[in-house]
Amino acid sequence: MFSFELLAKDGEARAGKLVTHHGTIETPSFVPVGTKGAVRAVSAGDLRKAGTKVIIINSYHLHLRPGEDFIERMGGLHRFIGWEGPLMTDSGGFQIFSLGAAKEHGVGKIAPIFPEEKNRGGHFSSKRGKPLVRVDEKGVEFVSYLDGSTHRFTPERVMDIERKLGADIILVLDECTSPLHDYYYTRAAMERTHRWALRALETFRLTSDNTQAILGIVQGGAYRDLREESSQLISAQDFDGYAIGGSLGRSKNEMHRVLEWTIPLLPEDKPRHLLGVGEIEDIFQIVKRGIDLFDCVLPTKIAHTGTFFVKKTDRFRIHILNAQFKDDPRPIEARCRCYTCRNYSRAYLRHLFMAREILGMRLASIHNLYFLESLMHRIRSAIKETRLAELEGEWLSPKDAGPYP
Amino acid sequence: MFSFELLAKDGEARAGKLVTHHGTIETPSFVPVGTKGAVRAVSAGDLRKAGTKVIIINSYHLHLRPGEDFIERMGGLHRFIGWEGPLMTDSGGFQIFSLGAAKEHGVGKIAPIFPEEKNRGGHFSSKRGKPLVRVDEKGVEFVSYLDGSTHRFTPERVMDIERKLGADIILVLDECTSPLHDYYYTRAAMERTHRWALRALETFRLTSDNTQAILGIVQGGAYRDLREESSQLISAQDFDGYAIGGSLGRSKNEMHRVLEWTIPLLPEDKPRHLLGVGEIEDIFQIVKRGIDLFDCVLPTKIAHTGTFFVKKTDRFRIHILNAQFKDDPRPIEARCRCYTCRNYSRAYLRHLFMAREILGMRLASIHNLYFLESLMHRIRSAIKETRLAELEGEWLSPKDAGPYP
């Protein structure tokens, strides 16, 4: 059971409705990441109250521990993690990058042109180390970070893993390349990814019980001809939707160009997911280019160290440990209706992080998720009322914006 | 505003109702500990859902950070920590022990007779180290564990701190002695504690705005004549209730004897608080000797490492990391109605602790608090129906007990 309905357009931005076996998602929608089967520091109840409609879990991590067969015996992933809403699983393709080339090259999905950008974190940097991955035509071999055991993933095997996990929306195995891979490697990996996609789709069609939807993944790095070729080839296959994966170049601008090359070649009537992007400053950029879904660890990752989203600051963040918040009796955001802002002051939240009380991490995750969900709610309304540009102006030029809505 | 009403007795056990400025507490009641202004891993909302009616916070820790003047400016402790229910603060007396003699002697509030008991944890052991405390007639000097600065607490100063914090029930400064202190030291410390109590009470009466109630503290270690003398002297003062503090001897049996010497000498019409005791196996023992309130870090402390309360096991605990729970699809307790048991399996909870997801700690705290609160609810009902002995038999001889109620 899966359908996608386009409700409104504002330029290339789309407002839609995605119906899955476990409920409906209004798009564009942010998808929080629960890498190992839990969105960092929050429960299913917290997610529901934050307005979260769909989460994505990493098949690779669950395969290593506790294992897909075990989760199937436990009644499937929804029941195991206590989340009854729409659920996605990724394929392990990102780990081919994060445990492979990202370590070898010391980069993230966007490689910085200027070394100082590394310090900006986000998509830019990764710790250098020995790669734990070997790719060949059949698939990929991982060395487990848990115990050094080796695990082979093939496109067919990943379909089997994701079928056992039982998420509503699943992804095919792909190779996510590095921004530092050259044209020839990126092309070879893309062509292999295409062959994998066909193998995965065939397996999926033979074994599916029609409760799951499957997304194909467009690759091709930051090379225009590769992205165009990949978009055409993957969108010619009967996937239920399309994801855009892999390297997004050497800057945010290159990322925007990748979207501009790719999206016009994808079918209008199916959903489009951008993998692993979701800083606040990215959201307007990707939504107005036609993205319907995007996932990112950011809101819960930065929550862990006391960083809270707010509207009117540089990069939409404050770090609660800064001394300026010591005496601050105000909530993080004056008009925010999240549990954290309704109950706690900046001074208390700072105290919790100073005292290393883990309640602070949860309260930060709750706020950051709610903040993003309520931004997405506004974006959806703005698209329906064709005033997305106005909303963007209000957010991206805070100086010129009116009072907090 | 403070009153205590005795509703029923079953032997020496009492069911009562304590009315404070921020709400009513049915007694006997367990008081969770929020040392630094947060009960470990849970929010005020979690506490309310667990059935918690009252919590206790450590004045000493809040004095060091963020400071009582600061909290007063923030509108008081209730508002600062987001807890609108009844609230207690302790006096720093326990830290005189925990940062002083407990370190010097390497013991807890009960010193083991047999070295192997040390491994049982709980009240028995403490890490040996250099004491950070010096006591004299005026008061006590602490060396801050945060930055090495020195802080003087006097009985008068502690009243000032606790008045600024603004809890509903506050405690006088006392010296909590060690089970390894001899008779002469214990007597001298007790007599000093008595003088401190009178000084504190005088300060309290002069500065109180009648929103706070004050408890005196009985000391005297495990010496009968000292406990009797202390009970008589302290209960002759017009405190709103009485706490039993200090060393509780060298075994649980000695602790029970301390209660039997002390409680009959306390006034029937005022509440009695036992400081820092609350293992499941202690609860029936202290309630049937006439205790109305008791506080303990245990349920949230053991939650931090994956230990959950259950009814029918040794010491009422299971450690979720044990391999036997790996494939266990059942909730922690089949009929428990806590958020954790209604939503998650033992297998998933084990997975969270294996994966070091902090959600696990919160779910364990929620269960352990709910478990204790629901035991206390049953105990209160049993007292009212004069069948506490029956309930005790069911809990303390699980083999002979009927089906889970």
Image (cartoon, coloured by chain):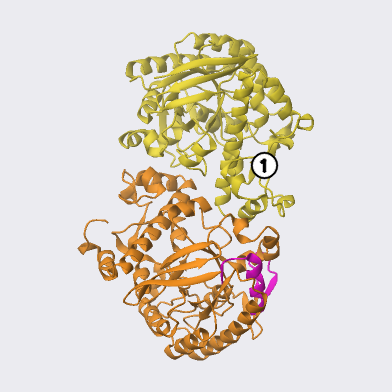
Chain colours: A orange, B yellow
Q: Is residue A162 magenta?
A: yes
Residue furthest toward the right?
B399
Q: Residue at 73%, 52% (x, y): give it.
A: B323
Instruction: List x then y, in percent, for residue A134.
Output: 63, 80
Instruction: Give x and y (percent) for residue A190.
Output: 54, 86
Q: Is residue A214 left or right of residue B280?
A: left
Q: Which residue carries the number 1 mark?
A: B333
Q: Is residue A153 magenta?
A: yes
Q: Which residues are magenta?
A: A143-170
Q: Residue B402 placed where, x, y %?
A: 75, 31
Residue drawn at x 62%, y 45% is B341
Question: Residue at coordinates 67% horizontally, 21% vertically from top-left?
Answer: B388
| Visible residue check, residue B128 | no
Query: As shown in the figure, which amino acid type bears the numbered disc 1?
Result: Glu
Which of the image's four quarters has the N terminus of chain A?
Answer: bottom right
Q: Nearer the viewer, residue B326 or B224?
A: B326
Residue A329: image quadrant is top left
